[in-house]
Image (tube, helix red, strand yellow):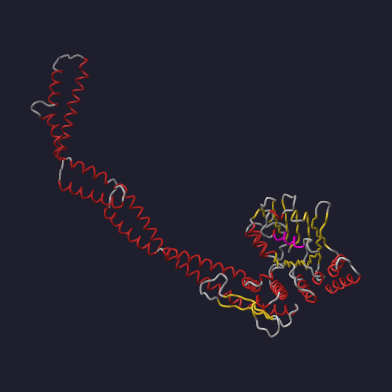
Amino acid sequence: MLVHLSVQNYAIVEHLDLELERGMTVVTGETGAGKSIMLDALGLALGDRADSGVVRPGADKADILASFDLDDIPSAREWLHERDLEGDGPCILRRVITAEGRSRGYINGTPCPQSDLKALGERLIDIHSQHEHQSLLKPDTHRRLLDEYSGSQELARQVQLAAQRWRQTRQSLERLSNSSDEQRARHQLLSYQLEELENLALGENELDQLEHEHKTLTNSEQLLGACRQVIELCGESDAGNVLSALTSSLQRLTAFRQPPTALAEAVTLLGSAQIQVEEAMGELNRFVDHFDADPERLQALEERLDAIYTLARKHRVQPFELPGLQQRLLEELENLNADDEAIGRLEEELASYKRHYDEKAEQLSAERQAAAQRLAAAVEAEIQRLGMPGGRLGIDLKPASNDEPQPYGREQIEFLVSANPGQPLRPLSKVASGGELSRISLAIQVITAQTSRVPTLVFDEVDVGIGGPTAEIVGQLLRRLGERGQVLTVTHLPQVAAQGHHHLFVHKARGTSETRTAVSTLDEAGRIEEIARMLGGVDLTEQSLAHARQMVMDANA
C-alpha cells in the first residue's frame, strides 16, 4: 500500500507531502488545479518515461519519492529479495529528473534502471486512466483484461516467450537452409581440393630438401669433374701436386740440425696444412666413391616437384604456402560441417519449442475459456447497474487462423456488446457510444480490479461521461473496492466524492510572482463544503451544504 508521496519541483508543484491510508481516497479540485499532476508524479516514481519539461521552472531538478508498505504484497518482497534490494521499513521508490533531462532511479536508496522501477511498480499499483475506454476498442486490450481477470498474466508471458523463441529459431533455421545448395556445392569443391592436397602429402621442409637434392643431381657431372680435378691437384698429379709440394717444403726446412727459432711457426703451419690437405682428399675420395648420380632418382625428383608446382599454380599460391592452404580449407570444411550439424540441432530445438508452446498455449486457452463466461457475466451485471438496462457483454474467443505459434496464444479475443435489449452482440467499436463505452470500460475495470493482486488501485477520472444516479453507483463500486485495500480516485462527480473514506483537495496557491499547486487533506466540514461546491458552484448555499451533508451521511451509513 502507498503510505507516503513526496513531490518536489515537479511541474507547478514546489513541495508536496502526502500521507495516505487504506480505504478510498478521493482527489478533487477545480479544472486545471493539477489533480492529475500528483498521479503523473507517482507514475514517474513507478518507472514512467520523463523529460526535462517536468522540472518546475527555476529549479535544477524534480525529486519524487513514494513509500510503500509491503505487508500485503509478497510478490514485491520476493522481487526485492531476489535482487538484494530489501530494506528496513517501507519500500522507497525515488526518481530524480534534472533540468538537462537526465533521469536517475532508486529503490531503497540503491541506484537502479528505469525498467526496474517499472517492474516493481507493476506489483505495487494498478493505474486505470480516464482514456482507458479508448483502448477498449483494441483486441489487445481485450486479451490483456481477460488474462488479468483469470490470473493468467504469467502463463500468457510464457506463451509469448515460447512463441518468440520458436520464431527466432525458425528464422535461424531458414537462414541456414536457404544457403544449403550453395554450401553443398562449396562442400564438394573443398572436399576435392583437400583430397588433392592430402594425396600430395607434402611433408615439413620436404620442398627445401627436394629442391636441394634436385639441384645436386642436375649438376652431378660438373660436380664429380671438379672433385676429381681437386684430388689430382692435391695429390695425384705426376707433374706436381699440393701434397708433394708441402712434403718437400717441410723436408727442406727441417733438414738443418738447429734451425732458427723464427722458422718454428712456419714449420708448424706447413705441417698443419699437410694434414688438412690429406683429410680434404679423404673426404673428396669418399664423396666421389659414394656419389650416386642415378638418372631414375633425378626423374622421380622432377616429377615430385612438378606435382607440387602444378598444384601451387592451380591454387595461385607459392609452393611453400600449400600446407597453410590445406589447413584453411580444412577449417572451412569443418565450418560447413558444423552448419549441417547446426541445422539438425535447430530442427530439434524448433520441435522442442513447438511442443513447449503447445503445452503452455493449451493451458492458457483452458484458463481463458473458463474465465470468459465469468467475466462476461460479472461485467454484464455491472453495466446494467450503470444505467444500461438490458445491456449484454459477450467474449468471443476465435481460433487463430494460422497454426504457427502466435505470441498471443491460440485464439483472438474480442469483447462483444449489445447496448439495448433485443439487439445482437456486436464489436464494441460498432455499437457503443462514448457514454456507453465509458460505462462498459468502468465496469470492466472495477471487475478486473477485484481480482487484482495489487492492493493499491488508482482511478484517474474514469467516471467521465457518467452522471446522475449512475454516478452514485460508480462511487459505491469504488468504495467497495476501497474496503478491500487502497483506492485513489480523481473525480469531478460529487456522487463519487461523497463515497470516499478520505478526501484530498487540490488547489492553486498564488504568490506574488508564481502559482503553485497545493494539496490539503479535508476534515469532515471541509469535505462537505467541497462536495457542496461540486454540486452548486462557487457560491455555497444552505441547500447545497445540506445536500452534501446528506450524501456523506448516506455513504457512511
Q: Nearer the viewer, residue 243 or 20?
A: 20
Whether residue 167 is visible, yes or no, is yes
Question: Looking at the picture, how far across and down is residue 339, in whole percent?
Answer: 41, 61
Of 430 and 223, the residue lying toward us: 430
Q: Residue furthest left?
A: 238
Q: Identify the residue at horizontal 39%, vertical 64% (top origin).
A: 180
- Magenta part of the chain: 35-43
Q: Is residue 394 above or below residue 101?
A: below
On the image, which quarter does residue 217 sit in?
Answer: top left
Q: Is the magenta region chiefly helix, strand or loop?
A: helix
Query: At 76% across and 67% down in the image, what residue appears?
Result: 489
Quarter of the view holding residue 450: bottom right
Q: Position of residue 33 (x, y in %)?
A: 79, 61
Q: Residue drawn at (75%, 60%), measured in percent from left and top?
A: 37
Query: Is the C terminus in the top left, top right, bottom left or bottom right quadrant?
Result: bottom right
Looking at the picture, how far across and down is residue 304, in whole percent?
A: 22, 50
Q: Is residue 428 magenta?
A: no
User: Given the current orientation, which residue lies at the most extreme right position?
Assistant: 542
Q: Is residue 151 visible?
A: no
Quarter of the picture holding the N terminus: bottom right
Taking the image as shown, residue 316 lies to the left or right of residue 350, namely left
Nearest to the observer: residue 521 or residue 341? 521
Against 405, residue 390 (above or below) is: below
Residue closest to the eye, 342 or 549 = 549
